[in-house]
Each structure stands twice: as structure tokens, then as C-alpha cells.
Amino acid sequence: MSSTRADWSRLTKWLVGCEKDQVVFTWDELGAIVGGLPASADDHLAFWYGDRPHTRAWIRAGYKRVAIDHKARTITLKKAMVSHDPEAVLEAFPQLSFWSSLLSKLRKIFPGHVKS
């Protein structure tokens, strides 16, 4: 586990370039892609669920989480769609449209204070 902050955009880029329909990462492999995983990935199963930067990273690439094996320290991601077209992603994951709209509004209200 790492004390540095992971760059989850690297995972998105990696997955967009991936031609496999399903990918299984060990946490070490995933950490190597993003620059290290936080200790909470090991300590808390809840790390792998919810609306978080890392879950949005695989959703943006068109993948969904299908399995977490906490004991084996692996995560399995599967393509949720064939296309990486942003409109198709928003159609498949309508909640992203809401969050994207909210983020845009917050950026207008608080310029320079709201980050992606």
C-alpha cells in the first residue's frame, strides 16, 4: 500500500486501451497502474464500492465491477458496453449525467475551488 495519492485517470486510460471484455487485477497490479493504493483498499472492503474517484475511473472507461476478492486481493472488471462514446456511457450510467451537471454548476458558483 502507498502513502502517495493514486492517479485514477491512469486506470481510465489503461482500460480504454484494453481490448479484453474482462480484466482481473491484483491490487499490486492496480497499484502499479495508478501509482499506489491507499491502506484503506486493504483495510476496508467498502473502499471498492460507492461513488468514489476509483469507481468512476472504471465507469468512465465503460467497465463495471463484477467481483472483489478481499482475501486474494483481486478485483474483476467487465466491459459494460462496447462503445467508449461519452453519450453511450451517459445512457448506460444515467447517474453520471446528474453528477456531471452538478459538477459544472459548482464550478460556475465556486470558480477555481472545485476539482475533478
Image (cartoon, rainbow, N blue to C red):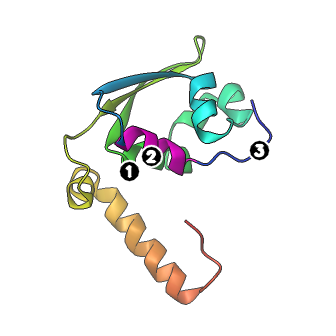
- Separation (CA) of disc 1 from disc 2: 7 Å
Residue assigned mark 1: 60
Find out whether the residues at labels 1 and 2 contact each other: C-beta distance under 8 Å: yes
Circle 3 sits in a helix, a strand or a loop, which is it? loop
108 above or below 39? below
Mark positioned earlier in the residue sequence (3 or 1): 3
Residue plotted at (52% across, 51% down)? 9
Where residue 91 sits, quadrant-wise, is bottom left
Residue plotted at (60% across, 28% down)? 45
Residue assigned mark 3: 4
Q: Which residues are magenta?
A: 8-16
Circle 2 sits in a helix, a strand or a loop, which is it? helix
Find out whether the residues at labels 3 and 1 contact each other: C-beta distance under 8 Å: no
| Image position, residue 23 (x, y; %) | 39, 24
Residue plotted at (36% across, 40% down)? 17
Q: How many marks?
A: 3
Identified by mark 3, the residue type is Thr
In the rendered image, which quarter contains the C terminus? bottom right
Residue 79 shown left or right of residue 115 in the figure: left
Residue 15 forms part of the magenta stretch: yes
Residue 89 forms part of the magenta stretch: no
